[in-house]
């Protein structure tokens, strides 16, 4: 099974926005955004994702990335 990689820290750095400023704009507690930024969450509400995207002027795909596990990648030698 693959996994979701969170890139919030990268987008925040690109926008030169700190955690406190984003927290104020999004209306989510600093500690919760910190968990999101560090990948210590298992779910996110769409309303929170929308607020983050609006505050950072980005798309959800800028923050979330899907990565396949090595074992789920097709074997290039077998022609799959």
Image (cartoon, helix red, strand yellow):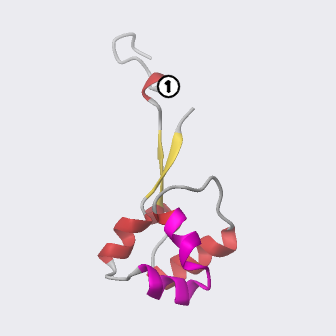
Q: How many numbered circles does the render carry?
A: 1
Q: Residue at 38% across / 70% down in the picture?
A: 11
Local SS, label 1: helix
* Relative horizontal placement of residue 42, taking residue 69 as reference (left or right): right
Q: Residue at 50% across / 25% down in the picture?
A: 72
Does the segment drawn in magenta span residue 13? no
Quarter of the figure with residue 27: bottom right
| Image position, residue 37 (x, y; %) | 47, 65
Quarter of the image with the N terminus is top right
Is most of the magenta stretch helix, strand or loop? helix
| Image position, residue 13 (x, y; %) | 32, 74
Q: Residue at 37% across / 83% down in the picture?
A: 17
Location of residue 24 with respect to 44 vertically, above or below: below
Q: Which residue in the rendered view is the most extreme toward the front?
A: 31
* Relative horizontal placement of residue 31, taking residue 71 as reference (left or right): right
Near mark 1 (Cα within 10 A), the count class, few <14, some 14-19 or many ≥20, is few
The residue stretch that appears in magenta: 19-35
| Image position, residue 10 (x, y; %) | 35, 66
**Front-most of residues 65 and 39:** 39
Does the segment drawn in magenta span residue 34? yes
Instruction: Name the residue carrying label 1.
Output: 72
Q: Residue at 61% across / 75% down in the picture?
A: 50
Quarter of the figure with residue 44: bottom right
| Image position, residue 76 (x, y; %) | 35, 18
Quarter of the image with the C terminus is top left
């Amino acid at each position: 099974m693959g996994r979701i990689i969170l890139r919030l820290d990268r987008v925040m750095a690109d926008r030169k926005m700190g955690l406190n400023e984003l927290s104020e704009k999004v209306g989510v507690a600093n500690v919760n955004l910190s968990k999101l930024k560090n990948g210590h969450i298992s779910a996110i509400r769409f309303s929170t994702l929308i607020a983050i995207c609006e505050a950072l002027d980005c798309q959800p795909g800028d923050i979330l990335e899907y990565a396949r596990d090595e074992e789920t990648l097709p074997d290039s030698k077998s022609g799959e």
